[in-house]
Amino acid sequence: MKLKRSSTSEGSLSTTTPWTVNVTRKDQMKIKTKFSLLAGCLICACAAYSMAQGNSTHNSENEQVVHEHASSATLVQLVRKGTSQYIDVNNATAAGYGPFLGCVAGTDHGAMGVHYVNGTLLGNLTLDPSQPQALIYEPINGKMRLVGVEFILDAAAWLANNNNTPPVLDGQVFNFVDAPNRFNIPAFFELHVWAWRDNPQGAFVDWNNEVTCDSQ
């Protein structure tokens, strides 16, 4: 995997005084006055520039946040639209999805739920909002409620077929999970999308405090 590095270089400033100038006391007072006025102007100018930069940065940050929220909402809606048929878990099993490892709960908070994985989609490196490799269900009183999806891509195969570029879906960069891992599978890229259950920590965070395995 190629990593982009950023670097900065610092220049040095040297000053030399190749001659000596004789200055009278009167001239020194004039020079001192002029430098005082110049310093005052520079202070005002710097203050104005800082305010302008602050406003510009603030506006830029606001625009970025709005863009990120818009992007998140877009992907969530695409996933909801593309997976609505799987609200009924029977439709999921008919489409080739099957339960894997039971209900996954966090060690200190939240849970993921039960992953219904589609082996065919895992094998062909599909990257489509309507075809997640795994559907996530929360077990509630003997029934399965769809809460989200997970996109799972084998890391070695994906990188080999995509010029060592990590996967991105609608602006969302996938997380990399190395091996060995808790699932005992090779290294992979993954992205959770909580399209059917709100996640206070974020729509793409792995663990959801609003999901539980207590009722399985």
Image: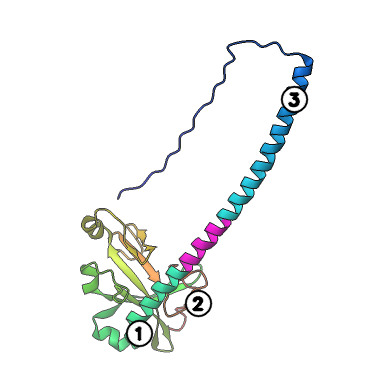
Left or right relative to 195: residue 57: right
Question: How far, Cα to Cα, is label 1 from label 3?
Answer: 77 Å
Position of 26 compared to 57: left or right? right
In the displayed structure, 129 sits above or below 37; it is below
Label 1 sits on what residue type? Ser
Q: Find residue 59 and report its image quarter.
A: bottom right
- Name which of mark 1 and mark 3 comes first in the sequence: 3
Residue 183 higher or lower than 15, as above or below: below
Instruction: Look at discs 2 and 1 and give the one toward the viewer.
Output: 1
Say which residue label 1 marks: 84
Q: Residue at x 21, y 68 (%)?
A: 123
> In the picture provided, is 166 more to the left or to the right than 112?
left
Which x, y percent locates residue 14?
54, 22
* Magenta-drawn stretch contains 154: no
Task: Tell me if residue 133 comes above or below residue 37 in the rendering.
Answer: below
Residue span colored magenta: 58-69
Q: Is residue 207 visible?
A: no
Residue 84: percent from the left, percent from the top? 35, 84
Q: Which residue is mark 2?
A: 210
The residue lying at 31 percent from left, 67 percent from top is: 152
SS label for mark 2:
loop
The three-letter amino acid code for the residue at tag 2 is Glu
**Where residue 11 sits: x, y (%)?**
49, 30
What's the residue type where badge 3 is placed? Lys
Disc 3 crowd rating (10 Å Cα; few below 14, some 14-19, many 20+) is few
Q: Which residue is mark 3?
A: 32
Residue 59 shown in magenta: yes
| Alpha carbon separation for disc pair 2 and 1 | 20 Å
Q: Is residue 156 or residue 186 the one in the foreground? A: 156
